[in-house]
Amino acid sequence: MTLAMREALLAFRRAPMLSALSVTTIAFSLFAFGLFGLVALNIREALGTLEDRVEIRAFLGDGTAIEASAIALDDIQSFPEVANATLVTPAQALERARQELGEFSDVFDAEILPASIDVRLKPGFRDPTTVRAVAERVRTYDFIEDVRFGEEWVEKLYQIRNVATIAGTVLGLTFAIVAVIIIGSTIRMAVLARAREISIMRLVGATDGFVRRPFLIEGTIKGAIGGMVALFLTWATNGIIGRLVFAADFFDVRVSIAGIFAGALIGLLGSAVSVGRHLKSV
């Protein structure tokens, strides 16, 4: 293993330009994939923020006893889909309306705004079917006059999320496949550049495993370096966008480390395939 590691490191000194080309190709391939991942991450976060605003508002009839509304509130909070339910008095409703619609604050009167029970749902229970089902259960209380949850808005939000998920999966797989093909071709060039060396090693009795090992280590190192460079470029691009356009979320530590390991794995697999093909032809 020590000999294989030494041979792998010597390969960088023997052909620095080719090694640099391999690392650069891996870096920019993963950089393109990283940018796409960053866009997908921020779209998902934006949709998640919108989903947090999904709310069912049940308006209470005039003269509803406080005891009845309190019992209903406890009952609704026990629904498995419900994160929390809040009783909003007419005075609180008036204050909220004046804050949200300040330019029309003079229009509102405490007498025209009814009390309500505001219901927020747990993540995973905000699709149109579930929201509608919960709204219908809330509507069954006798003192509930009306229930609203922005049905059309919820359906459009859910459709956008589904389209974004499908498009993200398809485009992500496409970017990944293209990156693997490009990286594999680059590593193939490095293997072909040392074709004569491989042939001599085979002639003196070297096993396939002995021949492969330095190339696998070399490919893994190149892939890891390319992954780190790609991560840095993605981070720098995210910082520039944050300063010039808008603040965007970045990958967490686990995803960042996984990206570097992904580069190393791609380099390893690309080397294994390229060397394996060449050994079959020798």
Image (tube, helix red, strand yellow):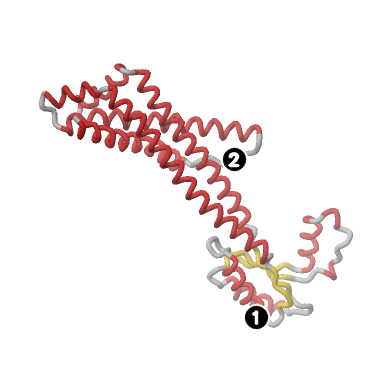
Q: Which amino acid type corresponds to the residue marked 1 in the rendered image?
A: Thr
Give left or right: position of 134 versus 9.
right
- Secondary element under disc 1, as helix, strand or loop, is loop
| Amino acid found under the numbered disc labelled 2 | Ala
Q: Nearer the viewer, residue 204 or 50?
A: 204
Q: Quadrant of the C terminus?
A: top left
In the image, taking residue 250 as reference, residue 9 lies left or right, namely left
Which element carries disc 2, helix, strand or loop?
Answer: loop
Whether residues under marks 1 and 2 lie with C-beta atoms below 8 angstroms apart, the answer is no
**Considering depth in this image, is 139 or 204 the residue closer to the camera?**
204
Classify 42 as above or below 67: above
Q: Nearer the viewer, residue 73 or 14?
A: 14
Identify the residue position indicated by label 2 in the image. 248
Q: Residue furthest bottom?
A: 142
Q: Can you give x and y, in whole percent of width and height, for residue 272 in the image?
A: 27, 36
Separation (CA) of disc 1 from disc 2: 43 Å
Q: How many marks?
A: 2
Q: Which residue is mark 1?
A: 140
Q: Residue furthest front?
A: 281
Q: Give the residue drawn at x 66%, y 80%.
A: 141
Vertical arrangement, residue 129 with respect to residue 189, above or below: below
Q: Residue 24's image quarter?
A: top left
Q: Quadrant of residue 67?
A: bottom right
Q: Quadrant of the N terminus?
A: top left
Q: Earlier in the sequence, mark 1 or mark 2?
A: 1
- Please report the residue visible at 40 percent of the width from the left and 34 percent of the height from the top: 182
Dot 2: few (<14), some (14–19), or many (≥20) neighbours within 10 Å?
Answer: some
